[in-house]
Amino acid sequence: MDLILWRHAEAEPGEPDFGRQLTSKGLKQAERMGGWLDHHLPDSARILVSPAERAQQTARALKRKFRTVEDLAPGASVAAVLVAAKWPDSRDPVVVIGHQPTLGAVASFLLSGEEANWAVKKGAAWWLSNRDRSGHAAVGLRVAIGPDFV
């Protein structure tokens, strides 16, 4: 299974948190990363998105259908993300568009076996793959890329 963790792009500060909009820089970040992902993702990829407006705006830049998942809201647990993504059993790649520190904790848990405060930059995507290697599951990092590099 492929799991792509995409952090929302740069957003304006303020309250209420759920209503924060992307900045003009954030809109550009989302467009760049959305274009890169669209080029690399198969048509069968499932897109799951936090209900927060900044994540919704980031998702719209991908220009694909997506599903809003309340359990991916800011403060989501690693377990909630993995359940929503159907890790490690989903047949199709899954893109999760969400927030820090959750996405960094998901990446650290899958790659090291422990939750840690790994940084995922605004607008960046981490592409993880789970493959069966001689009867043993192996999780690897295919790419970690920010919007400035696409």
Image (cartoon, grey):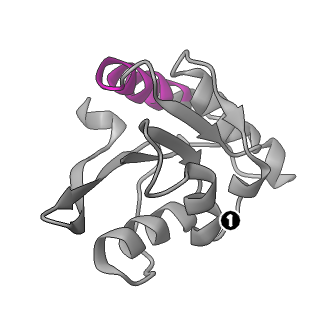
Q: Determine which quarter of the picture holds residue 92.
A: top left
Element class at badge 1: loop
Q: Which residue lies furthest to the front in this view?
A: 135
Of 124 and 140, the residue lying toward us: 140
Q: Where is residue 138 in the image (x, y as percent from the top left)?
A: 22, 65
Tell me: residue 148, above or below residue 69: above
**Which is the main secondary structure of the residues drawn in magenta?**
helix
Q: Is residue 21 visible?
A: no
Q: In this view, does 66 lie to the left or right of 8?
A: right
Q: Is residue 76 visible?
A: yes
Q: Position of residue 123 (x, y in %)?
A: 45, 42
Q: Which amino acid does label 1 sit on?
A: Ala
Tell me: residue 119, above or below residue 114: above
Q: Which residue lies furthest to the left in this view?
A: 134
Of 123 and 23, the residue lying toward us: 123
Report which residue position mark 1 lands on.
Answer: 76
Magenta stretch contains residue 35: yes
Residue at (46% x, 21% y) in the render: 31
State the extent of the magenta-drawn residues as a range: 27-41
Residue at (64% x, 70% y) in the render: 77
Q: Determine which quarter of the picture holds residue 32.
A: top left
Residue at (38% x, 44% y) in the render: 125
Residue at (36% x, 47% y) in the render: 1
| Label 1 environment density (alpha carbons within 10 Å; few <14, some 14–19, many ≥20) | some
Q: Position of residue 8 (x, y in %)?
A: 56, 43
Tell me: residue 24, above or below residue 93: above
Magenta stretch contains residue 110: no
Of 145 and 92, the residue lying toward us: 92
Q: Is residue 124 left or right of residue 15?
A: left
